Image: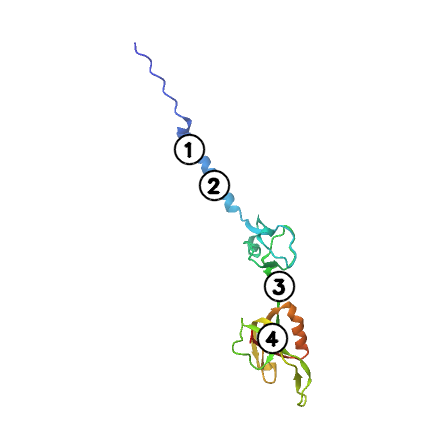
Amino acid sequence: MSSPSPAPRPRPAWREPRFLLGLVLVVASVAGVAGLVAASDRSVEVYAARHALAAGDEVAAGDLVGVRVRLGKTASAYLHAAPQPDTVVTRTIAAGELVPVGALGAASAQRETSVVISVDGELPASVDVGSSVDVWSAEASGAGAGAGAPKFKAPRVLVPSGTVVRVVRDSGLGAGGGVAVEVRLPKDSTAELLESLANGDDITVLPAGA
């Protein structure tokens, strides 16, 4: 008498076509939702102040914290990358405030200013935009031997190592023509130079070290 045939093993559920089809649909649905969320996320990462920063404070990566916010078209107005060395804030930034690019500047620029100096005659050929120059001053000391001719003391370097920002040649600057030179110089030299100009001292701009 023959023994009964063993019952067939049930097929694992994960091999069922309907199960596999359902799994594919679930994965596709999740991926679609994730893609839709990512596409609708218009936030960008910018920097905010980790603590309050006063005007003139140097800014380093440790003073900032990255945050994701929706800024739209104004995103470019805020700091996206770590600041360069020698960067300072030019106005107070509160703790947690997004850091505007316009509120940052170079520390060296905050210690300097520009003054326009009118010079009689022509400048030396080597003096042009970007040149390093010394500003010389001969102090006026009253009338000279000639009728009404001014008398000046020995010249001295009033401002060493300024930088020429702009040169304007204009025949209207004086009877014999002249040149207006915009020089960037340390702020602590400004008062003395302006006083010298106001006193009618003879001002000359020469190459630095000349």
Asked if labels 3 and 4 touch by Cβ distance under 8 angstroms, the answer is no
Q: Depth-wise, is mark 2 or mark 4 nearer the camera?
A: 4
178 shown above or below 187? below
Q: Which residue is mark 3?
A: 110
Left or right: 128 as drawn, with respect to 147: left
Judged from this view, the residue extending furthest toward the left is 1
Q: Is residue 13 left or right of residue 45?
A: left
Disc 2 on helix, strand or loop? helix
Quarter of the image for the N terminus: give it.
top left
Q: Position of residue 83 (x, y in %)?
A: 56, 56
Structural distance between the alpha carbons of marks 4 and 1? 84 Å
Q: Earlier in the sequence, mark 2 or mark 3?
A: 2
Dot 1 amino acid type: Leu
Identity, as a three-letter code, of the amino acid under mark 4: Val
Residue ID at (65%, 71%): 190
- For the residues labelled 1 and 2, the Cα–Cα distance comes to 16 Å
Q: Disc 4 on helix, strand or loop?
A: strand
Residue at which label 4 appears: 135
Q: Where is residue 183, by image quadrant?
A: bottom right
The answer to whether marks 2 and 4 mark residues whose Cβ atoms lie closer than 8 Å is: no
> In 3D space, how far apart are the residues under numbered discs 4 and 3 (Cα atoms)?
21 Å
Q: Earlier in the sequence, mark 2 or mark 4?
A: 2
**Residues packed near mark 2 inside 10 Å, few (<14), some (14 to 19) or many (20 plus):** few
**Image position, residue 135 (x, y; %):** 60, 75
**Among the 4 quarters of the image, the one containing residue 146:** bottom right
Residue occupying the point 68% across, 75% down: 195
User: Residue extending furthest right?
Assistant: 142
Q: Upstream in the sequence, badge 1 or badge 3? A: 1
Residue 171 x, y percent position in the rendering = 58, 82
Q: Name the residue tied to disc 2.
A: 32
Q: Look at mark 1 in the image and give the residue it sits on.
A: 21
2 or 3: mark nearer the eye: 3
